[in-house]
Amino acid sequence: MLAKTTLTAALALLGGLPVASADCTRDALLAAAETYIEAQRTGKTDGLHLATSNFTYRENNKVVDLGKGVLGSTALTLDTNRSTADTVACASYTMLISSSGAKPYVLATQLRHDTGDPSVITMIDTIAATTGSLFFNAKKTLGYIQAEKWTPLATADQPSRDLLKKVGDAYLDMWTDKNAADTIPWGTDCERVEGSSLTRPCGASLPHGGSAQPNAMRRYVIDEVMGSVDVLCAFNSLGNMPDSHEIRVEAGKVKYVHTITV
Ligand SMILES: *[C@@H]1O[C@H](CO)[C@@H](O)[C@H](O)[C@H]1NC(C)=O
Ligand SMILES: *[C@@H]1O[C@H](CO)[C@@H](O)[C@H](O)[C@H]1NC(C)=O
């Protein structure tokens, strides 16, 4: 095995063959996200291609053993899944809803990959909301989320990466910056699902500062094709809450906001 690997490497050097392919493609990211969904469905993580050194599993902003978290310890019947891909950060975002079990869940998960070998997952980062979480009612959330239309956007309707990052940040800054809400391009038919609480249009009743605690630990997955930004964070403005904010922008305007807060 070792000898064969060494030989292959030597041949690659001699022949100038590529030793590793470093393309972080949508297809590869979404295929890896499928392996994550399958792992959560079965509660078995052996199908995941995890980094052998320095792999991190984080749940609700704390590093925990993979086997002790919801992913490694619980098989969940899944009602729905939806994933987005960030080819620049080499990461993906997946939302899962499991509403029928004794312990229902709404999960927000970012996978991060080794940029040298995108097939390898270096981090699984999950916000796991369940009974007792903010506005938690998985069945109600499921109804709202299933009614949304998340199809890839036509090129002309795709927001830039820069706009998505700005909208994600401005949203999380609304509690500490009184002007942040007015910088966001709200769509008139936009809706916001916070836990299981629906607000339409989503630009109604917004915070305009008031807190001195910025929302911290922001981790982004930005997907121009889906027009989405997902930010996992420590929602400190209203107390230290593990949180996911996902926003979809269509033709320059905010269309959906989905928050999952523990
Ligand atoms: C290990 O992973 C952590 C979290 O992803 C990262 O910050 C750190 O730089 C990594 N260390 C090494 C030696 O790669
Ligand atoms: C994820 O959702 C797709 C439809 O978007 C579905 O075909 C697939 O079966 C789902 N995967 C699981 C494991 O539920």
Image: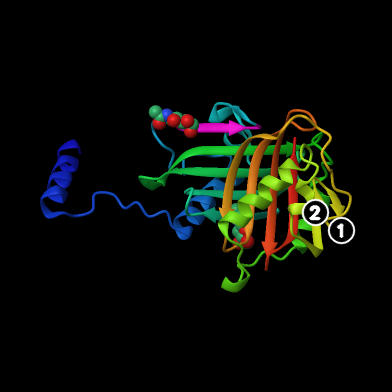
Whether residue 102 is visible here, answered yes or no, is yes
Label pair 1/2, CB-CB below 8 angstroms: yes
Image position of 16 (left or right of 245): left
For the residue carrying disc 1, how many other residues have a C-alpha within 10 Å: few (<14), some (14-19), or many (20+)?
some
Task: Indicate the secondary structure of the residue bearing disc 2.
Answer: strand
Q: Residue furthest front?
A: 179
Whether residue 82 is visible here, answered yes or no, is no
Nearest the camera: 36 or 203?
203
Residue at 74%, 51% (x, y): give it.
258
Quadrant observed for ligand 2 in the rendered image: bottom right
Nearest the camera: 101 or 126?
126
Q: Position of residue 80 (x, y in %)?
A: 68, 55
Image position of 251 (left or right of 38): right
- Closer to the chain start, of discs 1 and 2, is 2
Q: Amino acid at mark 2?
A: Arg
Q: Position of residue 76 (x, y in %)?
A: 66, 43
Task: Indicate the secondary structure of the residue bearing disc 1.
Answer: loop
Per the rendered image, the range of residues in magenta is 54-60
Q: Amino acid at mark 1?
A: Arg
Q: In the drawing, what numbered circle is on residue 161?
A: none
**For residue 242, which quarter of the picture?**
top right
Q: Position of residue 87 (x, y in %)?
A: 48, 54
Image position of 11 (left or right of 152): left
Q: Please name the residue that numbered disc 2 is placed on.
A: 192
Q: Please name the residue that numbered disc 1 is placed on.
A: 200
Q: Residue furthest left?
A: 14
Nearest the camera: 18 or 136?
18
Residue at 80%, 61% (x, y): give it.
190
**The N terminus - image quarter:** top left
